[in-house]
Image: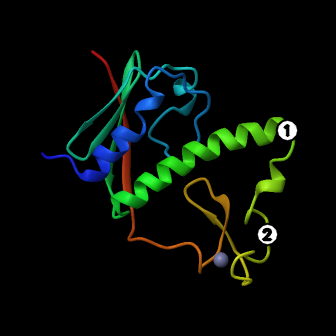
Amino acid sequence: MPEGPSIVILKEAVQSFKGRKILSVSGNSYQIDKERLTNQKVTSFKSWGKHFLICLPHYTIRIHTIQSLPPRKLTELINEARNYSYDFLAWKKAFVLKKHWLIHTKKTCPRCNIPVIKKHLGKTNRRTFYCVNCQLLYKKTKKATRTVKHQ
Ligand SMILES: [Zn+2]
């Protein structure tokens, strides 16, 4: 099965994390044991068809993606998530994290001056804030995650 462009872009974008240790894990997947992933070293990232693989010393996480996010937007999302993780750490250490939140806990979008939507989304009912004007909704994304034990 040929790899989709978004999988190839994803694989390229995460290569700098190869050999790095996983410091924390979050998300709404109930199919993986998040605690087991903490402090594991990523040995490699691989892809196969629509499967994206995160290889760890004793097992591999397989993510099957069926998504409609355009590849360029996926690249932007990955780059911004990476940038934000470093900003987050720096701001948290400097006790200025809340100062940089643009929409989290806000009542009005600072860009559009319209009410912010607050919802509890996902399987964990995570509190989420968004602006219907700024936040583009792409077609529904399906994702399945599995942990595969090495033989
Ligand atoms: Zn807005």
Amino acid under disc 1: Ala
Q: Judge the density around disc 1: few (<14), some (14-19), many (≥20) Cα neighbours within 10 Å.
A: few
On the rendered image, what quadrant is the N terminus found in?
A: top left
Q: Is residue 150 above or below residue 147?
A: above
Amino acid under disc 2: Lys
The residue depicted at 51 percent of the width and 20 percent of the height is 40
Q: Are marks 1 and 2 in contact (CB under 8 Å)?
A: no
Q: Judge the density around disc 2: few (<14), some (14-19), many (≥20) Cα neighbours within 10 Å.
A: some
Counting from the top left corner in percent of width and height, residue 63 is at 35, 42
The residue depicted at 74 percent of the width and 63 percent of the height is 102
Q: Nearer the viewer, residue 149 or 110?
A: 110
- The residue wearing badge 1 is 94
Q: In this view, does 5 lie to the left or right of 117?
A: left
The residue depicted at 56 percent of the width and 72 percent of the height is 135
The CA span between labels 1 and 2 is 22 Å
- The residue wearing badge 2 is 106
Tell me if I can see residue 27 in this picture: no
Q: In this view, does 111 lie to the left or right of 150?
A: right
* Quarter holding residue 116: bottom right
Counting from the top left corner in percent of width and height, residue 57 is at 40, 15
Q: In this view, does 64 lie to the left or right of 27?
A: left
Counting from the top left corner in percent of width and height, residue 24 is at 61, 32
* Quarter holding residue 90: top right
Mark 2 residue element = loop
